[in-house]
Amino acid sequence: MQYPAKVLLAWGEAISGNRQLLDWLMKNGYEELGMTCHAIRLVDTARAWLMSNGQPHLMALVNGAEGNKNAVVWLRQYGYTYLADMALGADNDDDAIQRLIAAEQREWAGVALKIRSVKNQIEERHNDVHSLSPD
């Protein structure tokens, strides 16, 4: 996967909720990155879109960020080393972030940290809702 640095920066901001940059990605040839933003936020239609539009590696990134170790194994098996480390980094593995930085992949590390932030917020909300439920 090759993207200009400015596209990766825009993707990170779109993941964080910048709607204008999300729209820009969707309208300027980076629909797969826009759909990944939606998939990170648990939108099932975006997850299905990634799988049916030749982007299983991006869906594996999302699954790996959610703690699915098999997705990380799959990414490594098919040569997506940076995406595997992004998935691990997004799943709170600081060593994976350091590997990306050491490999001079700061933009990818930054995107992983944006995904981490969103995924942790989703998890917090999920846990808060369940802690309010009677046993």
Image (tube, rainbow, N blue to C red):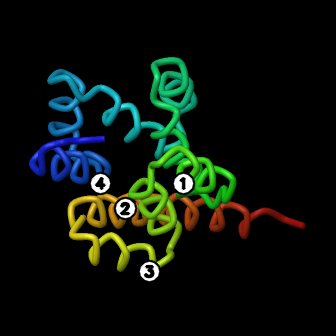
Residue located at (66% from left, 66% from top): 127
Give the secondary structure at mark 2.
helix
Which residue position is annotated with label 3?
94
Q: Nearer the viewer, mark 3 or mark 4?
A: 3
Give the secondary structure at mark 4.
loop
Contact between marks 1 and 4 (CB within 8 A): the answer is: no
Give the secondary structure at mark 1.
helix
Q: CA distance from mark 1 to mark 2?
A: 16 Å
Q: Residues within 10 Å of mark 2 (few under 14, many from 20)?
A: many
Which residue position is annotated with label 4?
16
Of mark 1 and mark 4, the one earlier in the sequence is 4
Q: Nearer the viewer, mark 4 or mark 2?
A: 2
Q: CA distance from mark 1 to mark 4?
A: 26 Å
On the rendered structure, is 123 left or right of 117?
Answer: right
- Percent coordinates x, y for residue 14 in the rendering: 25, 45
Residue type pointed to by label 1: Arg
Give 126 or 99, whichever is nearer the viewer: 99
Q: Which mark is residue 76?
A: 1
Residue located at (21% from left, 60% from top): 107
Which residue position is annotated with label 2?
112
Of mark 3 and mark 4, the one earlier in the sequence is 4
Name the quadrant of the N terminus. top left
Q: CA distance from mark 3 to mark 2?
A: 10 Å
- Percent coordinates x, y for residue 64 in the rendering: 57, 55
Residue located at (44% from left, 80% from top): 94
- Percent coordinates x, y for residue 62 in the rendering: 51, 48
On the rendered structure, is 68 left or right of 117?
Answer: right
Image quadrant where residue 97 sits: bottom left
Of mark 4 and mark 2, the one earlier in the sequence is 4
